[in-house]
Image (cartoon, grey):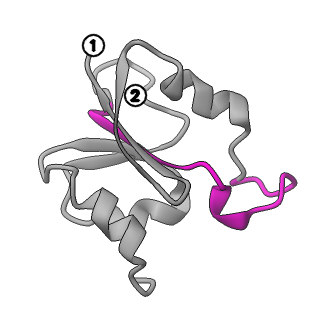
Amino acid sequence: LPPPLPRQLAIAARIPAGSIVSTQQFLFPRMLGKKGCMVFPRVKTADGRYAADFALLDRRNNGLRSESPAFIPEGSFAEVAGSPSWRLVASQDGYELYERIQ
């Protein structure tokens, strides 16, 4: 695992172990022990059978350049941040944790 960063761990610790989480690839190691993970911006499986309970977002994209294939454009963040289906649970240092409410 990468060395722990307090802000990542503090927010990730708020996610219950039985949850499915949508997050960026570089945050997957922080999701150890969760029920499952999806690569954000996916928040549901293709067949709709499973949906993320939480979305953990790094709005700074871990410093990635826009040319990177792992870079998430701002519009993708807005699909969760601006949706009435999600509630902001925590925000710190560019990290945001959302919980699905619908």
- Judged from this view, the residue extending furthest toward the front is 92
In the rendered image, residue 71, in percent from the top left (x then y), is placed at 72, 51
Q: Which mark is residue 1?
A: none
Q: Mark 2: few, some, or many residues within 10 Å (few <14, many ≥20)?
A: few
In the rendered image, residue 80, in percent from the top left (x then y), is placed at 49, 26
| Image quarter (top left, top right, bottom left or bottom right) of the C terminus | top left
Q: Is residue 71 left or right of residue 57?
A: right
Q: Is residue 25 left or right of residue 96?
A: right
User: What residue is rendered at 66% in x and 56% in y?
Assistant: 61
User: Which residue type carries mark 1?
Assistant: Gln
Q: Quadrant of residue 51?
A: top left
Relative to residue 85, is residue 69 depicted above or below? below
In the rendered image, residue 13, in percent from the top left (x then y), is placed at 22, 61
Mark 1 and 2 residues: CB-CB less than 8 Å, in contact?
no
User: Can residue 58 be found in the magenta stretch?
Assistant: yes
User: What residue is rendered at 32% in x and 69% in y?
Assistant: 9
Q: Mark 1: few, some, or many residues within 10 Å (few <14, many ≥20)?
A: few
User: What residue is rendered at 53% in x and 20% in y?
Assistant: 82
User: Which residue type carries mark 2?
Assistant: Thr
User: What residue is rendered at 68% in x and 44% in y?
Assistant: 72
Helix, strand or loop at label 2? It is loop
- Please give the residue where the numbered disc 1 appears in the rendered image: 102
In the rendered image, residue 10, in percent from the top left (x then y), is placed at 29, 65
User: Can residue 33 be found in the magenta stretch?
Assistant: no
Q: For the magenta stretch, what is the residue range? A: 52-70
- Please give the residue where the numbered disc 2 appears in the rendered image: 45
Relative to residue 28, is residue 5 depicted above or below? below
